[in-house]
Image: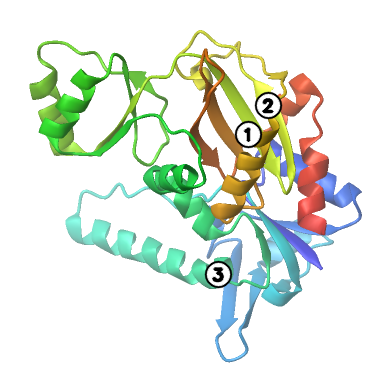
Amino acid sequence: MHIALLGNEKDPQIQHVASAITQSGHQNFIINTSQFGISWNLSYDPDFNDGCIHFNHEMCEINQSMPQRITFSSTHSAYWHEYITGEPITSSNQEAAYEQSWIEQEKSSAMLCWFSFNDIKWVNPIDAIRSHQCKPAQLRAAAKLGAKVPYTFIGNAADVATQFCYNMENVVYKPVRGGKTAQFVNKTPELKPLLTTLLHQRPVTFQKYIGGTNIRSYVLGSDVLSVEIPSTELDFRNDKNATPVITLVPKETQRLAVSICKALGMHWCAIDWRKSAKGTYFFLEANPSPFFMKVEKDTGLDITGRLVSLLTN
């Protein structure tokens, strides 16, 4: 049985996980989705509900242990680190740009044959990846389980957005899908016309700012490993000097973290909390493909071992 690893073969975290799996005595192979149709292909037969990943001869020559093809059904599990798109659309020709966009959609749909193969233990499945791209769905699911969620506005209705910002003392801007760090909203007298212009271009997420401490909980099955990330930055990802330290979170917060992870269809994730001065944990998001090597190095927490256990059991 094989274990698939989705991501760039040169990515340090992919290499780290691949090495750990090999040391555990299991076979693995790396799939770079941007190389679909170049270094690997797939075939799928709906009648038999099975398919194959086919590797080109060059890859097999570089890696002598790599078989020319691996069936979906012989893949025990898959670690989803990163979905990498193909070449960006750069053509100024509208017809050529449309054709390139259509081809990328066709590739994406073909790969869904594999991503949707439920006999593989996806860590994590594509629905969980999509839920991360729709933060409102995550917030709703967490709130239903009893998590505290900061007051939030999502959308592009300028009047409502403006009123929301004026109702809160401090407001944070976040992209709806993610991908960029958070920023404070500057409530100037020109706020409404500025928001009208911005929201004409794209929707936004506004949240009430919660002062306090950054807490990240890594959920791996029923285990919860938490760290505090001290930082003076609004978003600790902007702080290159932020060093995580091990912290203990209340048992009820640990149980809630496990429940959120399961409710979102994940086997593992990293949940970001904001711990207020009164000790209340506010749910911010659950990342289904988090980075963890720096946290592991700085704290000594064994995240890798638990992740390998999820993939091999």
The reply to whether residue 63 is in sight is no
Residue 195 image position (x, y, % from top left)? 15, 26
In the rendered view, would you say 308 is above or below 279? below
Q: Mark 2 — residue?
A: 249
- For label 3, the SS is loop
Residue 65 image position (x, y, % from top left)? 84, 61
Question: Nearer the viewer's eye, disc 3 or disc 1?
Answer: 1
Cα separation, mark 2 vs mark 3, equals 35 Å
Which is more N-terminal, label 3 or label 2?
A: 3
Three-letter amino acid code of the residue under disc 2: Val
Residue at horizontal 86 percent and vertical 58 percent from the top: 26
Residue at horizontal 32 percent and vertical 65 percent from the top: 102
Q: Is residue 164 left or right of residue 2?
A: left
Three-letter amino acid code of the residue under disc 1: Thr
Cα separation, mark 2 vs mark 1, equals 6 Å
Q: Can you name the residue that lies furthest to the top here?
A: 232
In the rendered view, would you say 237 is above or below 130? above
Q: Mark 1 — residue?
A: 253
- For label 1, the SS is helix
Q: Can you name the residue that lies furthest to the bottom here?
A: 47
Density class for disc 1 (Cα within 10 Å; few <14, some 14-19, many ≥20) is: some
Do the residues bearing badges 2 and 1 touch, measured as CB atoms within 8 Å?
Answer: yes
Residue 43 image position (x, y, % from top left)? 58, 78
Do the residues bearing badges 2 and 3 touch, measured as CB atoms within 8 Å?
Answer: no
Q: Mark 3 — residue?
A: 116
